[in-house]
Image (cartoon, helix red, strand yellow):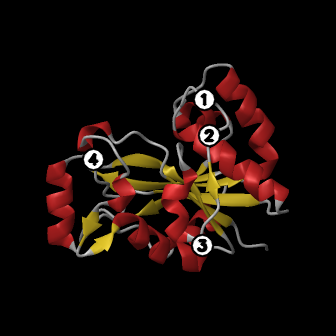
Amino acid sequence: MIQPHGVILAGGRATRMGGGDKGRLMVGGVPLIQRVIARLGPQVDALALNANGDAARWADLSLPVLADASDDRPGPLAGVLAGLDWAADLGCPHIVTAAADTPFLPPDLVPRLLAAAGPSGLALAATQEDGRTWPQPTFGLWPTSLRDDLRQAIADGTRKMLHWTDRHGAGLAVFETAPFDPFFNINTPEDLARAEAMA
């Protein structure tokens, strides 16, 4: 099987952190984005960054920068679509996405997602807590064969990732949250302080 390409989703506005690029925040002396690259990069054949605005600010990463196709910033589904179009142009049948603000993402994310893929080829990471399963939709395996369906869904107003993935029967790869949640993401200064302690 062809290994997926990886897409780091960094297209958000980071309003709760005061704006700017969260990926540039430092945790343990290392930028968040570098931590995500170090974790996801070895698991995929190629890596790209979904980000909006001036792509030159990411030039130091030496990665393709994929902007949302839509100017109205419809959310992470638009980043997934940009990644699917990129991978399809390269002949890759699927991508794996990860959020740019999650420095501790699992080192076995990709094989676990591949093993959990539903009939459509979709899979999402998930965690369990108090007997409930919580999908982590920014961490997913996405087949390029569904990109036109996703394009139409976004055009029709779909914004929530789970609304679209549920329609296509996404499988779930469930990850342990002990000793810590591998999908812990940094949204606030308090989260940043917690990540610093975890690192």
Query: Residue 52: where, in percent of width, then height?
Result: 54, 43
Which numbered disc flags the more N-terminal residue, 4 or 1? 1
Q: Residue at the location (30% across, 37% down)?
A: 15
Distance from label 2 to label 1 (Cα)?
7 Å
Q: Amino acid at mark 2?
A: Asp
Residue on which disc 3 sits: 111
Nearer mark to the viewer, of 2 and 3? 2
Estimate how packed mark 3 is, as few (under 14), some (14 to 19) or many (20 or more) residues with alpha carbons within 10 Å. Answer: some
Asked if the residue at tag 3 contacts the one at tag 2, i.e. Cβ–Cβ closer than 8 Å, the answer is no
Q: Secondary structure at mark 1?
A: loop
Q: Earlier in the sequence, mark 4 or mark 2?
A: 2
| Disc 2 and disc 1 in contact, CB within 8 angstroms | yes
Q: Nearer the viewer, mark 4 or mark 2?
A: 2
The structure residue drawn at horizontal position 16% and vertical position 61%, both measured from the top left corner, is 194
The residues tagged by marks 3 and 4 sit, at their Cα atoms, a distance apart of 27 Å
| Apparent side of residue 44 relative to residue 109 in the rendered image (left or right) | right
